[in-house]
């Protein structure tokens, strides 16, 4: 997520904190079908304050009254932010990254745990999260095909108007460069250690990897 968007989110949270009715929110927490963990536990597990969690929950509940979101709803919500392109494929990959227990739904806990890392996590935590996103089949490795699938999905979502001179082979060319640098032992897959080491030591790749933050 870029700096301007983070500032906007922070400003909205700050503005809403002063008007949040904590008693009402506690009642709302017990009213949904899927009741999230207690605020104290989520506050300990994330980098959000109790007030911020209450505000995030209120927004989550407005979109997902049942307390959980399935993939189709997630795609519909995400598509609203990228009307100029096709966000469905990237939203599918992103949903799987948030759905940490792989049960086909994203709970409020799943949502805030991921958001905490993306907004306020360390570089190491963000890179771990990014690796999980690119590791589509969750086998602990990133293949060239997986990286290409994610890259194509990002370009499709951003739309032709964002990249007016984008050629069809551009994503594959980018992936070839990235993968050659990351796959240090040339075994055809990228481990999490190779991924993190390469990202931390190559400024160009690090800047390019931030692309995924801008579309979250």
Image (tube, rainbow, N blue to C red):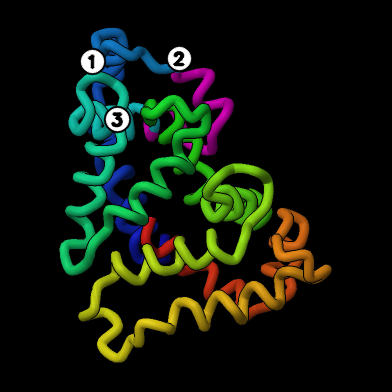
Q: Which residue is mark 3?
A: 69
Q: Where residue 27 sits: x, y (%)?
A: 26, 10
Image depth: mark 2 or mark 3 in front = 3
| Residue 200 position in % (x across, y down) | 71, 68
Total numbered circles: 3
Circle 1 or circle 3, nearest the eye = 3
Residue bearing the label numbered 1 = 24
Q: Residue at x 24, y 34 (%)?
A: 59
Q: Is residue 181 visible?
A: yes
| Left or right: 138 in relation to 35 | right
Which quadrant holds residue 123? bottom right
Q: Is label 3 in a helix, a strand or a loop?
A: strand
Is residue 120 covered in magenta? Answer: no
Q: Estimate how packed mark 3 is, as few (under 14), some (14 to 19) or many (20 or more) residues with alpha carbons within 10 Å.
A: many
Question: Which residues, given as a range, are shown in magenta?
Answer: 39-52
- Identify the residue under disc 2: 38
């Amino acid at each position: 997520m870029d700096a301007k968007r983070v500032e906007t989110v922070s400003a909205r949270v700050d503005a809403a904190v002063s008007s949040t009715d904590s008693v009402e929110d506690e009642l709302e927490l017990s009213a949904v079908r899927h009741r999230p963990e207690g605020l104290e536990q989520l506050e300990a597990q994330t980098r959000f304050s109790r007030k911020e969690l209450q505000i995030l929950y209120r927004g989550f509940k407005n979109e997902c009254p049942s307390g959980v979101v399935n993939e189709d709803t997630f795609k519909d919500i995400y598509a609203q932010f990228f009307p100029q392109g096709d966000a469905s494929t990237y939203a599918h990959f992103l949903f799987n990254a948030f759905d940490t227990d792989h049960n086909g739904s994203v709970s409020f806990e799943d949502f805030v745990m991921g958001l905490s890392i993306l907004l306020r996590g360390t570089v190491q935590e963000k890179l771990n999260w990014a690796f999980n996103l690119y590791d589509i089949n969750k086998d602990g490795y990133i293949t060239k095909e997986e990286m290409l699938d994610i890259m194509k999905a990002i370009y499709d979502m951003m739309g032709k108007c964002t990249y007016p001179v984008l050629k069809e082979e551009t994503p594959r060319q980018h992936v070839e460069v990235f993968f050659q640098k990351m796959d240090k032992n040339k075994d055809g897959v990228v481990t999490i250690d190779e991924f993190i080491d390469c990202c931390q030591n190559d400024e160009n790749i690090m800047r390019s990897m931030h692309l995924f933050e801008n579309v979250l």
